[in-house]
Amino acid sequence: MKLLVVWFLNALALLAVAYLMPSIHVSGLSRALIAAALIGLVNMLIKPLLVLLTLPATILTLGLFILVINGVLFYLVGHVLQGFEVQSLMAGILGALLYSIISWALSALVLGDKD
């Protein structure tokens, strides 16, 4: 049940990012749900490989290169999925950063610290 709540909160965060950034567009809630699932899948499968391959750049930039990796993956999902559009790589980087902040805040508000 918690997984479904987090998935829905991530879709709401994606809709909020699309509302706040004119260079990112989401068609509706159904596309936001699909995009949130695809972003999660890409972050789970592809991101660890990219982090490993770009480890020297990540070390040289003191970890800031991971923001670029997140932006590239966000931009990639925007080009693969119909109904979710990210216009530029810079919009992808800023969108991924904003998406993670909003998603974290929503999860903290709704789920709280129940441990």
Image (cartoon, grey):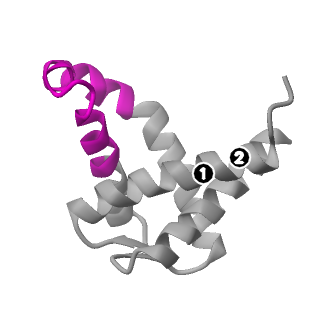
Q: Name which residue lies at 52% across and 50% down.
A: 101
Residue 15 at x, y percent in the picture = 57, 70
List the residue tagged with mark 1: 103
Kindly identify the residue that appears in the image at 22 percent across and 60 percent down. 89
Q: Quadrant of the N terminus?
A: top right
Q: Which structural element holds mark 2?
A: helix
Label at residue 107? 2
Q: What residue type is disc 2 on?
A: Ser
Find the magenta span and give its range: 47-72
- Cα separation between marks 2 and 1: 6 Å
Residues 111 and 83: in front is 111
Q: Would you identify the image quadrant in which residue 98 lies?
A: bottom left
**85 relative to 61 in the view: left or right:** right
Query: Exactly how many numbered labels are in the figure?
Result: 2
For residue 75, say whether it is visible. Answer: no
Question: Looking at the image, can residue 71 be seen?
Answer: yes
Q: Image point 75% across, 41% down: which residue?
A: 3
Is residue 63 on the magenta stretch? yes
Q: Is residue 46 above or below residue 51?
A: below
* x and y, in percent, of residue 16 in the image: 56, 70
Left or right of 108 on screen, residue 62: left
Q: Is residue 16 above or below residue 2?
A: below
Q: Which quadrant would the C terminus be assigned to in this image?
A: top right
Q: Amino acid at mark 1?
A: Ser
Q: Are marks 2 and 1 in contact (CB under 8 Å)?
A: yes
Is 28 or 114 nearer to us in this picture?
114
Decide whether the magenta segment is chiefly helix, strand or loop: helix
The vertical placement of 10 against 88, above or below, is: above
Q: Within the image, what quadrant is residue 92 found in?
A: bottom left
> In terms of image quadrants, where is residue 86?
bottom left
